[in-house]
Image: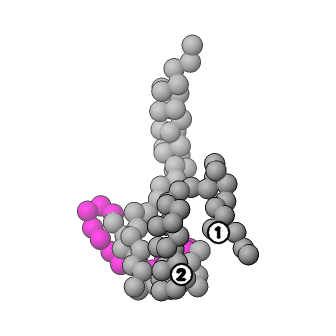
Amino acid sequence: MTNYENFFKDSLSTLKNQGNYRTFADLEKIASNFPMALNYQDDQVKNVTVWCSNDYLAMSKNPIVVDNMIEAIKKVGVKDNNIEGALRILKKK
């Protein structure tokens, strides 16, 4: 019988040793200062510019968008639509 725990540990070790293990930067977006963020790394915090965001129009800080998102959250809650499907509230009229 396959020992899956060891199999996956070994596979992850191989990826890391080859430099192919993907890690994500620990970023905290600064909504009031688009496109800046705080990068937390090795017990240090640095200001960085985020060049890879899909928020290229800075709509995430637009007051109208934010207010509408808050109202939608109050109405239907927060969830992932991958399983249940799209929310009716998001469908275009």
Work out whether mark 2 precedes mark 1 in sequence or the reverse, and give the earlier one. Answer: 2
Residue named by callout 2: 65
Q: Position of residue 14 (x, y in %)?
A: 52, 39
Based on the picture, tell me whether residue 73 belongs to the magenta stretch.
no
**Residue drawn 56% across the image and 78% down it:** 55
Residue 82 percent location from the top left of the image:
63, 52
Q: Distance between the residues labelled 2 and 1?
A: 13 Å
What residue is at 63 percent from the left and 68 percent from the top? 89
| Residue tagged 1 | 90
Does residue 16 appear to the left or right of 89 in the view shown? Answer: left
Task: Please tell me the numbered disc located at residue 4.
Answer: none
Q: Kindly give the residue lying farthest to the left in the view shown.
A: 43
Image quadrant in which the N terminus is located: top right
Judged from the image, the secondary structure of the residue bearing numbered disc 1 is helix
Q: Is residue 49 left or right of residue 52?
A: left
The one of 30 and 92 positioned closer to us in this rendering: 92
**Residue 52 magenta-highlighted:** yes
The residue closer to the viewer here, 50 or 75, is: 75
Dot 2, how many residues are within 10 Å of its Cα: few (below 14), some (14-19), or many (20+)?
A: few
- Which residue is pictured at 35% across the width and 78% down the height? 47
From the image, which quarter does the C terminus lie in? Answer: bottom right
- Relative depth, front residue between 70 and 44: 70
Looking at the image, is 51 positioned above or below residue 7? below
